[in-house]
Amino acid sequence: MRSKRLAAPLVLAAAALLGAAAPAQAQEWRTVTSARQLQGERALRVDLTYGAGELRVQPAAGTLLYRLQMRYDERQFRPVTAYDRAAGRLRLGVEGIRRNQRVQRGGSATVELAPSVPTDLHLEFGAGTANLELGGLSLRSVDLSTGASESQIRWSAPNRVPAGTVKIAAGASSIRVRGLGNARAERLRFEGGVGEATLEFDGAWGRSASMDVDMGVGSLTLRFPRSLGVRIEKDSFLSSFSPAGMVRRGDAWYTRNYDGARDKLTVRISAALGSIDVEWID
């Protein structure tokens, strides 16, 4: 399952780096801006694909359904902006126009989404740097995948609607996810390939939830607020585990406040090689 989930981001990263031996070609940079006003939309599916460069996602201001500003090399890419109002589906991003061509330098894109519209967000990001501010949106579900990247994902404010599932898959990367309590998700899932991952569970929980973590090779840091009741189940091969401040009962580790905590989180970890550390947010 994990190999299939990680295939998409790794393919994106590989595509961004294909043709490394190809001769360099001149780049022709273009900037495009696309936007659409709200027209009474009640739900939206957003498919965002970005292969290489710098990506930023954040809430839109005013009465915008979305806004995209992108700088790209027209010799290598073409922008994608397709909206099907009847189907409630929005496609954004870039696609390559040539195969086996060296990507000399990725461009940049900023995507803004309407906070008020209940949204299912599907995002595939390849190589580069991603900075995603998802706080304050109305995300019913989230499915994010990254390749060879450095990614920052934040819910700085509570999600406006409860989320069914939040899934995040990272390939060869450094990734930090903050404010997972603000996602208001019933089910969370993280899949890491190779690299460093920090998951921070701060935020306004208001519900109990579960999270599955599947980590390949690397380091995993879990940061919990002290008010959250946490139960950790671990199945690891050669991974060290430092559950500071937790006590073991049978085959699981618990926070001391677990039984009396209003909001509870069960974390199931499967890890191959590396380290797993527990830290606390005061």
Image (cartoon, rainbow, N blue to C red):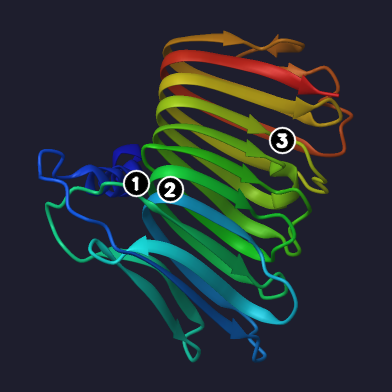
Residue 177 at what x, y percent from top left?
Answer: 61, 38
The residue wearing badge 2 is 145
> Which label's residue is closer to the chain start, 3 or 2?
2
* Three-letter amino acid code at the position of disc 3: Phe
**Three-letter amino acid code at disc 2?**
Ser
- Where residue 224 appears, as percent x and y from the top left, is 74, 27
Label 1, label 2: how many angstroms apart (C-alpha)? 6 Å
Horizontal and vertical percent position of residue 103: 25, 49
Left or right position of 266 against 55: right
Q: Please, what is the three-letter code of the amino acid marked with disc 1?
A: Pro
Residue at (58, 54) in percent of width and height? 165
Front in this rendered view, residue 13 or 238? 13
- Examine the rendered structure and indicate whether residue 57 appears above or below residue 258: below
Q: Check disc 1: other Cα within 10 Å, few if <14, some if 14-19, many if 20+.
A: many
Residue 201 numbered tag: 3
Q: Nearer the viewer, mark 3 or mark 2?
A: 2
Marks 1 and 2 close (CB-CB < 8 Å): yes
- In the displayed structure, 258 sits above or below 247; it is below
